[in-house]
Image (cartoon, helix red, strand yellow):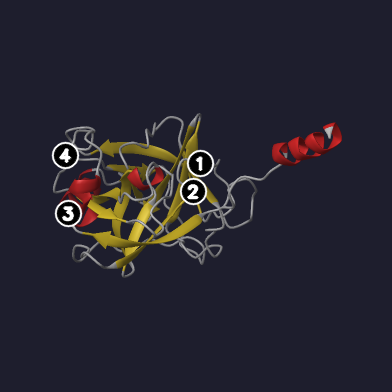
Amino acid sequence: MKLLLLVVALGLAGASPLKDDKVCQPHSRPWQVYLHGGELSCSGVLIDKWWIVTSFLCAIRSDSTIASLGEHDVTVEEGTEQHIHVADVIHHSPYRSPLHSLSMVRLASPARFTEYVQPIPLPNRCPQPGETCYVSGWGSTIPNQYAPPHYLKCITVPVVDDQTCLNTSPDTVIWSPGMVCAGQANTDNCLDDIGSVMVCDGRLQGLDWFANGCMNPAYPTVYTKLCEYNDWISNVMAEYRPTALP
């Protein structure tokens, strides 16, 4: 009897966690950027050879952050990467209020566009309820389960209407017009990576703001609604243009 209990105990101790199999097709998101340095690790998205957009929650420092482009498996060098230092970080003002969560990152040198590194177009419209979109980032896609960055993950999410988002969001989330929600019960609605990127119809439409779906799988996740920020992004790119263009 004691031997049986020991075998069971050893089996439980060696049990694997829930399988997270939402790995993207390698290099299918050539605009995805891995931002890292010090204790920092989060996602961004390349919109221009000089510029990356990410969440304010990705606490980037221009003196210590590296942007790795052309990544899939961040634990090894695959020969497709470009590692570029960050030169400047511009946060949307007011900083990290209920109204905005958006930062722009200027690279110290321009990205070289290749098969593995390409920018994504900005929105030409806003996402609509019921529309199918695609989210990618490095992290767990299983609610309430942490996973260190490894392979790029991809999930498919439906955009939900604002009222549904309001009804399901925690009290700590204060709604603003700069938000859009996606994901719902019985769908993929969790990708636990700060700044994970939502793309709809081939264009950038969202950046992770509140990963509610990773805390409760019945809740949609809140994203920054990028279609509301085209003018701000264009103004920042013009104002902070590099002084010496190669």
Alpha-carbon span between mark 2 and mark 3: 24 Å
* Between discs 4 and 3, the one toward the N terminus: 4
**Label 1: few (<14), some (14–19) or many (≥20) C-alpha neighbours in 10 Å:** some
**Badge number at residue 171:** none
Q: Nearer the viewer, residue 115 or 159?
A: 159
Instruction: Name the secondary structure under disc 1.
Output: loop
- The image shows residue 137, relative to residue 117, as above or below, that is above
**Badge number at residue 99:** 4
Which amino acid type is marked by label 3? Asp
Which amino acid type is marked by label 2? Ile
Task: For residue 48, say whether it is visible.
Answer: no
* Between discs 4 and 1, the one toward the N terminus: 4
Q: Quadrant of the N terminus?
A: top right
Instruction: Name the secondary structure under disc 4.
Output: loop
**Label 2: few (<14), some (14–19) or many (≥20) C-alpha neighbours in 10 Å:** many
Residue highlighted by disc 1: 145
* Between discs 1 and 3, the one toward the N terminus: 1
